[in-house]
Amino acid sequence: MSLIGWLKGNRLVDVTAQDPLPVQQQGAITTRTADTLLVATTTVTTDANRDLLGSTSTELPTLDNCMPYRKLVWFFFRAGADSTTYRVLARATDPNGAPLSTGWQEIVPATTLPGAANSWGRIEIPSAGDGYYDQYRIEVRRTAGNNYALTSKIVGVR
Amino acid sequence: MRVLILPLGDFIDRQRRAVMRRLGVTCDVARLSGTTLLLRRADGTSTTIDINGANNEPDGNAHQLLQQYDAVLVYGDGRLNATQGNTRFANWVKFSPCPPIVYHRVTLTQQSLNATDVTLPSDFPIRTVNASSLPSSAEADAFRLQTNATANGQALKTAGIRVQFTRENRQAYLPTYHIGETSPFDFTPVWLYRLDLAKHSALGANGEILATPISEDLAFPTDAFVAYRYRHTYWLPSHSAFGFGSLPWQLLEPCLDFWTLYGLKLAGVPVANDVPLVFCIDDALTVPTDLSYISSYADWGKVAYTTYEYLAQFYRRTGCVTVCGLFTGGRYNRANEPGEGQKHWDLVMRNRRWTGSAWASLDSATQSWIQQWHQLLLREHRHGLPCTIHDHTIRHRQNRVWSSFTRHSDSGYAYAAPNNVPKRRAQIYIPARGEPPAGAVEVQGVDGERYYALYPTDATRADYFTGTGETITNLEMMDYYGARVAWESAVAEMHALGFPDAHGGNENRLIASPNFLSGGPNIWRVLYEIGYRAVRTMYPHSNTTLTESEFDLNAIPLRREFSGLRFFDSQYFDIGAATAGTIGLYATAGSQHAVGVLGLDLGGDITGIWDTDREAAARRAFRRMVGHLTHVWLACGGGTYLPTFHPPSLTCADTSDPLRRFDVSDPNLRFNLLVELYENMAVVVELLYGYVRFGTVADVIGAQARYCEGL
């Protein structure tokens, strides 16, 4: 006999898989399949290893706690057309949040950032397959021309 | 209530939306593109409205649109040297009936009015400006808030003036200007518009001077004004277009400023989420490292104690909480970082101070003040001066291994000697399901899951545990238990000092990270468990004073929250060196003064006249300092920043009367920075009743959580 029962048709019944407690949904049930992980403006310079947060310290992640996400979608708006490359690094951490080692796995080598001045872009990370990395570092580097502003939003897709 | 905002330009648009979301004001947003309004309603629907020609005149499209609202807020990007679209909205002063319209930073030059086909009513009393040969052509009709024409600076620092509020009959120092000359943002030169006083008089009840500038070092013309009501329209100083955070995060900062909030008040727009203000002091009981800026350590003790007594009284009067971060770690003789320094325990329990190179005993008079000061903190811990850990010996350093760490042995603590607990990360982690394997320790992972940590079972197992002694080798801060051992020693020290808790009481659970180090998941989890709910640090991460091999390796999330712990960025309020102190407003020798530290000089208009016109220079420096710091504190109420202040910035107070107010006739120009700042803010809170209040850390946490929820 169950410790919990309820009155069903004037009869006390045990709570079972066939007779679950009658409940009413309170409010809408929402299931988030995507989360905003970053919104940032970056001045794109010729500095090596500058990430979207403006950091040139190579061990610092741009994004952390990304294990729930199979893919990141990077939306950006570039104010300048100046030649630019981007590079994506990724790695896993242990349950303490510590990277398994220093350094990164390069999942996208230095690649031309697409788009003209005042244009939008969208890049999936990784481009094929699933990610599930804990940390990502996304670097941008101008290879010619002048500095310009790159505005980014990155969404994590579960 | 239906509210329409009209932000000009992409940057201002983003900022204004962030501000409105922070305040909980639901509004429609209209952007101007040429002569078309792009209206985006709060319900997500959109439309376009032509406001060209007759459509921008009474009974036209624009008038019909505005009548659908209860209040309209125009956030312009005005500057005098350009014809700008924001001028088009000035035509709306002719609309009747019409809801209240609040104007910030609208270009009222003859050139811009002509270019946008705006003809102001003949009784409109604000003088329009001829921008044909700036700045001289404008000087007949507007007032430039600087003594030279060319110097570039930050207007929020250099345009602080004393403002008289007419309706409320109050005065406050605030950054105040109507429009820039060349910059659409907060850069100088900046100007105040002026009135045609004859037209103003003729308006009767239809014209009202709401606020005026008070002449100090600047002699304002009698027709200069700060805020004015013309019929249903309010003409206010510029909103702020400047954030404090690093560039990547500025998009997400709700940049609050006084004039935005005052505009909401005038228009009768209520806010769902008001602005709570708290203040924070680091190294809250300390003495300067030397006597460069004060006559004796006993005098310092008197100044500091009297000031904190004032802060406690101020709390009783206003409800303003001042969170005091105590410099712990001294009980265990751990070294201060970076560089040695006296800890709270050194001063209170060991009667010694750090000179910068050696320890020295406190004289009896200083010792007496220090003891009174400590007792005051104990008494006020549950009231206006909640005390928390601010440990410069442990710091929030995640990527660190202590070769030797001294813990405590007080009874009643899980991680005190002689308890043998883990101190290093295990070799193996497996999901915690079923019975734990022999010798395993259960931990929570960064992903929120539970794990069994499996340690070696051979003779090397002891290397992973503390043993029973007080001295521990190879203690890892990256490990949950290692971090717990370290932080529990600080908790025990707070208790040993007499505090009932180590986390600022129930409503003020804030820990101030020394040097703003960000830490990592296990440190954050431990801080949550020992009672904290917020960390003042920097985001997305800070590694100040660490070498690259020591860097913290985790980023603070976009929503500034990790497992119930919230993060705040930091803003300095010091006017001198954090350890030695300050000269005060300015001196030609030395650099530790308000003018230098805050950047208050504008093309030498303080430094260049300091020796020739001391009174004007001092008034200028003082009003800019108080106005700017008031603005910064108010901006902290946005919910993403908290103040950082070090007591040595009080060394410029009068040692014979530490609370004495600033008096420009004092040859030594002594003043108490906190008294001046708090009293000015008390007026601001009074002026913005219903919008701004003094609150607790819990209030600020709630404000941040509501703001970040939608990111």
Image (cartoon, coloured by chain):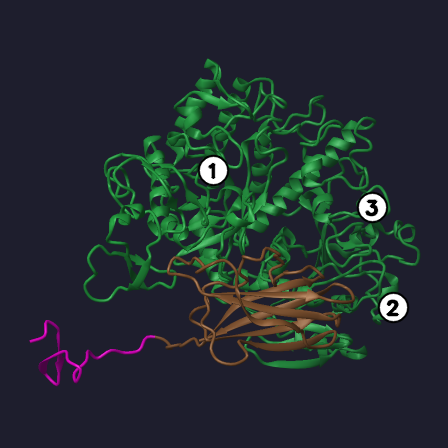
What chain does mark 1 sit on?
B
Q: Amino acid at mark 1?
A: His
Within 10 Å of disc 2 (Cα), the crowding (few <14, some 14-19, many 20+) is few
> Which mark identifies residue B114?
2
Within 10 Å of disc 1 (Cα), the crowding (few <14, some 14-19, many 20+) is many
Tell me residue A38's x, y (percent): 55, 66
Residue B256 seen anywhere in this rendered image of the structure: yes
Marks 2 and 1: which is nearer the front? Answer: 1
| Alpha carbons under labels 3 and 2: distance apart | 29 Å
**Please, which residue is most extreme toward the front here?**
B459
Q: Is residue B410 magenta?
A: no
In the image: residue A74, left or right of residue B38: left
For the stretch drawn in magenta, what is the main secondary structure? loop
Residue under circle 3?
A: B151
Q: Name the element at disc 3.
A: loop
> Which mark identifies residue B591?
none
What chain does mark 2 sit on?
B
Chain letter tied to green: B
In the image: residue B425, left or right of residue B592: left
**Please, which residue is most extreme toward the top here?**
B364
Q: Amino acid at mark 2?
A: Asn
The first of marks 3 and 2 along the sequence is 2
The first of marks 1 and 3 along the sequence is 3
Q: Residue at x 58, y 81 (%)?
A: B45
Residue under circle 1?
A: B392
Q: Are marks 3 and 2 in contact (CB under 8 Å)?
A: no
Marks 3 and 2: which is nearer the front? Answer: 3
